[in-house]
Image (tube, grey):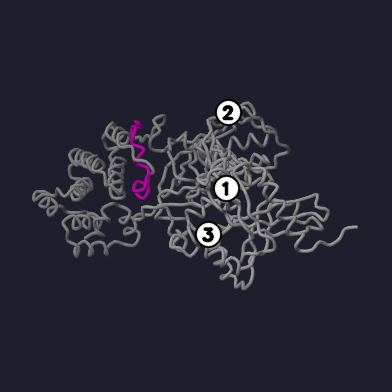
């Protein structure tokens, strides 16, 4: 028959549990008081610098205050736990705060005293400060729940937490002291360049993290102007993580996908690896986590890796093999992975280097790519009335003009760059059915010319100036020149090479087709942009007799006469005005 124990016997049993552990360590001793003889603590654990503690006072290291609470755990609610939350008196915390704090022990014992569990929390000053502040914020008047961690009853473990508390409390001083009261707040962490923490008895990185997670240690930092380290405010429930780069290959289904990965462990025991910034693998559950953040090149490899995960049941990471069963991939994820792969194929084919993270990819660009992928697949060929179809792909806020060549034999259609692909040409023919190669740059709109994804000056120049100039090609070349001016106006850097090419072209057209005012006006607007319109040029402009309102309006724009230019602009009908606005001369008009 079990008899209910008195409080004194429960306390004596609890103290005995600690004594038994401490007595088995050569550099520790104890002085415990029976039945709370001191104000708010029950005695001390003495620690010495070596085992010859009794013969020399010089071996003394520290005298660490402790509080011990004993409990009979009749239903064994606490004995089998690793972490518990238990109520602590705020009045006691205030007393501890006036000194250096203490180690608080909660000892749980079964009714027959066969099972025992030691729980502890190291209440160093900045930790007490946190709990008192939390109590005030919550409106607590008497008590606050504090987290206690289970301590394996090994002498070396007891020494580690005691020595750790000794180090922390010595660094911080009393809770009412300046160091603790001026501990570095979270909002001031931007002032900190480096932090440090040390843990007594940590045998591995994971052990270090666990002790941080248990609240055994505090971080410290230097702030400009202070020659000593200041503690950083402590917070309950912190998750601490260590990462390390591992040079080991990752294989799946006979294919190598990665040469290295970053390994992460945290204070809660989670172990993950990240072979790229988009992919994480939880090694405990073999769960694959995908969060697209990078550019498309990295995503392409990750997408192929995850699709392989969906087809296999094991993964080789370095020398280790991890098995998993029945991977389930949502259809939306599968579709996104296919999107990344096909997008990279298109970009590679077209020479588009899109390095921005996909997270900043606009919805307009996504839709433009998705539509192009469908058109490339051949599933919508009924939309093509011609064998060659043009398509303007959005790349960020820029344009990449493309052509899609229909595959009449089934399968994917072919996609090419409409401006820079040297494997196809654009032709015009004259009345005698002679065919002439003309610049592909001529066939894009002015808006696109202003906002091209890529300006390859040498390729544009080669196509323009290798074109035969005659009556059959002059109009196309005129459009090429206007697009060069558009590109200059729309280019932030306003590359002078664009104007130089346009100037050469219009000068040659003016020389070959004397009397055609259009080429003279366009040559002059190049000079206007280059600030090279001389007196002779102005005299030529004054003498020009335009044959329509657009030419006369352009003449007065170049002469800088806004009143006259506006008069002739208003004399145009609405359709003429809309056409005129699409020419680069209108940019000069707006700037008059």
Q: Secondary structure at mark 2?
A: strand
In the rendered image, which quarter contains the C terminus? bottom left
**Viewer-nearest residue: 428 or 391:** 391
Q: Dot 2 corresponds to which residue?
A: 256
Q: Dot 1 corresponds to which residue?
A: 47
Chain-order first, disc 1 or disc 3:
1
Chain-order first, disc 1 or disc 2:
1
**Residue plotted at (84% across, 62% down):** 4
Q: Nearer the viewer, mark 1 or mark 3?
A: 1
Q: Secondary structure at mark 1?
A: strand
Q: For the residues marked 1 and 3, what is the alpha-carbon distance in whole angstroms?
A: 16 Å
Chain-order first, disc 3 or disc 2:
3
Question: Are dots 3 and 2 in contact, CB under 8 Å?
Answer: no
Question: Are dots 1 and 2 in contact, CB under 8 Å?
Answer: no
Q: Residues within 10 Å of mark 1 (few under 14, many from 20)?
A: many
Residue 5 circle label: none
**Viewer-nearest residue: 382 or 178:** 178
Q: Dot 3 corresponds to which residue?
A: 100
Name the outermost residue toward the left.
Answer: 535
Q: For the residues marked 3 and 2, what is the alpha-carbon distance in whole angstroms?
A: 56 Å
Q: Nearer the viewer, mark 1 or mark 2?
A: 1
Name the outermost residue toward the front.
Answer: 55
x then y, percent, for residue 247: 53, 30
Where on the picture, by quarter, is residue 9? bottom right
x then y, percent, for residue 258: 55, 32
Q: Secondary structure at mark 3?
A: loop
Q: For the residues marked 1 and 2, what is the alpha-carbon distance in whole angstroms?
A: 54 Å
């Amino acid at each position: 028959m079990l008899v209910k124990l008195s409080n004194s016997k429960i306390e004596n049993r609890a103290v005995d549990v600690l004594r038994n552990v401490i007595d088995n360590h050569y550099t520790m001793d104890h002085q415990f008081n029976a039945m709370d003889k001191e104000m708010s603590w029950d005695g001390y654990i003495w620690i010495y610098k070596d085992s010859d503690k009794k013969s020399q006072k010089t071996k003394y290291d520290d005298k660490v205050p402790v509080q011990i609470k004993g409990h009979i755990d009749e239903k064994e609610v606490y004995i089998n736990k690793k972490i518990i939350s238990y109520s602590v008196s705020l009045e006691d915390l205030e007393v501890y705060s006036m000194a250096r704090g203490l180690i608080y022990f909660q000892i749980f014992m079964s009714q027959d005293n066969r099972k025992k569990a030691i729980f502890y929390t190291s209440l160093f000053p900045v930790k007490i400060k946190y709990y008192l502040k939390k109590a005030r914020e919550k409106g607590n008047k008497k008590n606050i729940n504090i987290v206690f961690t289970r301590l394996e009853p090994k002498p070396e473990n007891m020494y580690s937490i005691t020595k750790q508390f000794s180090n922390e409390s010595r660094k911080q001083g009393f809770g009412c002291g300046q160091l603790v009261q001026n501990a570095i707040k979270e909002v001031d962490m931007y002032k900190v360049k480096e932090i440090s923490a040390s843990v007594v008895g940590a045998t591995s990185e994971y052990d270090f993290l666990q002790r941080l997670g248990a609240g055994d240690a505090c971080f410290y930092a230097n702030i400009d102007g202070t020659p000593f380290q200041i503690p950083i405010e402590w917070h309950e429930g912190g998750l601490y993580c260590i990462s390390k780069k591992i040079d080991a290959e990752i294989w799946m289904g006979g294919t190598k996908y990665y040469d290295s990965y970053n390994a992460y462990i945290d204070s809660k025991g989670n172990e993950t690896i990240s072979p790229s910034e988009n992919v994480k693998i939880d090694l405990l559950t073999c769960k694959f986590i995908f969060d697209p953040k990078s550019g498309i090149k990295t995503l392409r490899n990750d997408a192929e890796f995850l699709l392989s995960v969906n087809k296999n049941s094991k993964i080789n990471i370095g020398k280790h093999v991890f098995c998993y069963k029945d991977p389930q991939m949502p259809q939306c994820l599968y579709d996104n992975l296919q999107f990344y792969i096909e997008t990279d194929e298109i970009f590679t084919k077209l020479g588009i280097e899109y390095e921005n993270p996909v997270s900043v990819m606009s919805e307009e660009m996504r839709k433009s790519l998705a539509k192009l992928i469908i058109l490339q697949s051949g599933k919508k060929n009924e939309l093509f009335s011609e064998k060659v179809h043009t398509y303007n792909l959005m790349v960020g806020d820029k344009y990449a003009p493309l052509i899609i060549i229909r595959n009449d034999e089934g399968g994917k259609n072919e996609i090419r760059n409409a401006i820079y692909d040297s494997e196809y040409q654009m032709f015009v023919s004259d009345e005698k059915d002679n065919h002439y190669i003309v610049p592909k740059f001529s066939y894009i709109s002015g808006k696109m010319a202003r906002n091209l994804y890529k300006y390859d000056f040498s390729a544009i120049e080669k196509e323009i100036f290798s074109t035969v100039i005659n009556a059959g090609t002059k109009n196309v070349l005129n459009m090429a020149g206007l697009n060069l001016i558009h590109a200059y106006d729309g280019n932030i850097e306003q590359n002078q090479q664009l104007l130089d090419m346009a100037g050469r072209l219009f000068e040659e057209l003016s020389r070959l087709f004397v009397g055609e005012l259009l080429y003279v006006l366009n040559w002059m607007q190049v000079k206007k942009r280059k600030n090279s319109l001389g007196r002779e040029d102005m005299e030529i402009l004054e003498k020009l007799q335009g044959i329509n309102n657009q030419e006369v309006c352009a003449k007065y724009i170049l002469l800088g006469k806004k009143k006259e230019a506006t008069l002739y602009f208003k004399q145009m009908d609405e359709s003429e005005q809309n056409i005129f606005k699409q020419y680069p001369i209108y940019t000069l008009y707006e700037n008059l």
